[in-house]
Image (cartoon, helix red, strand yellow):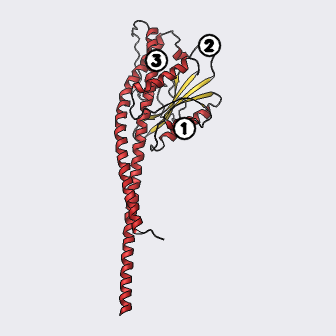
Amino acid sequence: MPASPRLIRRRLKSTRSTRKIMKAMELVAGSKMRKTTQQTLAARPFHLLLEQMRERVEQESHHAHELLRGRPGPKSGRSLLVIAASDRGLCAGFNNQLIKYSLEFLRTHETERFDLLTIGRRAEAVARRSGNELVASFPAISNAPSFARAKPIVEYIRDAFLSGRVDRIFFAYTHFKSALVQQPTIIQLLPISNEQLAKDDQTEEEQPSRTGFYSRYFKSEPESDSTMIFEPTSDAILEALLPRLVETRVYTALLESASSEHSARMMAMRSAGDAAAEMADDLTFTLNQARQSAITREISEISAGKAAIE
């Protein structure tokens, strides 16, 4: 039985209200995306510079720093995977793709014992059901990313590594390429390594010319300077540089994740708004048909009544 015009009008009103809500959420997500994208692009050159400095100083230093080589002595046999997702949904496949990528990484390393540290409630909910031990959980900082809000996460990660509770730390986040493209990525955070990805599904043509951490963001090679002078010593510089580098790596990854989240949410709300607009057009067409059918029926009834009187 076809729906009555009254019911169709009610559905049409609800659909138009939904479209307005989706449009408002799209504008909010777009504003946040532009802000976080600016922060991400501004952080990348600083991150690049620290990576170049670290590589150059490490070549001259003979100091086996713990953040580079790991803690000496017996190993714990455990690793830590940090998963940076979001607190809220409505961002298309942003969380699902990252979590699926992380779980696949755990399956390919099932011979290792992994603890989990999550950033965002969405990752925490999955981590509790994964069978791995959840050692800590932090709220997502994507709504207002700042270096100060990332500092507790960095301190926990660094303490877990330096205390010997874990031997390696991996960081799973979503790399921001554009408003339309975001790529789940896993890096080895500690010990500090030149290898960017723990698992990379790029083709050979897409892979950069070197495996440096910064090669994903910049295509140019760092220029070597054999006349560089270190003051006071290369070992002292490395001692001060490495903790700052860990902080920058984590903060940059969180910025990348925040930009990806807001981009995914903006596109999801745009798609939902477009779908609501199409539904409103269909309902309007159906309502017009129902009105026309009602008018035609009434005219037929009047004509039949007149014919019966005559």
Tell me the quarter of the picture where residue 292 sits: bottom left
- State the residue at coordinates (40%, 45%): 267
Circle 3 residue: 243
- State the residue at coordinates (37%, 79%): 298
Alpha carbon of mark 1 to alpha carbon of mark 3: how far? 30 Å
Circle 2 residue: 73
Disc 3, disc 2: CB below 8 Å?
A: no
- Vertical placement of residue 166 versus 3, above or below: above
Three-letter residue code for mark 1: Ala
Most foreground residue, 261 or 222: 261
Q: Nearer the viewer, mark 1 or mark 3?
A: 1
Examine the rendering and report whether any part of residue 212 can be seen. no
- Pinpoint residue 193: horizontal percent, then vertical percent: 51, 21
- Pinpoint residue 27: horizontal percent, then vertical percent: 34, 44
Alpha carbon of mark 1 to alpha carbon of mark 2: how far? 35 Å
Three-letter residue code for mark 3: Pro
Q: Earlier in the sequence, mark 1 or mark 2?
A: 2
Q: Nearer the viewer, mark 1 or mark 2?
A: 1
10 Å crowding of disc 1: few (<14), some (14-19), many (20+):
few
- Vertical placement of residue 125 versus 271, above or below: above
- Give the residue furthest to the right: 111
Alpha carbon of mark 3 to alpha carbon of mark 2: how far? 21 Å
Three-letter residue code for mark 2: Gly
Q: Earlier in the sequence, mark 1 or mark 3?
A: 1
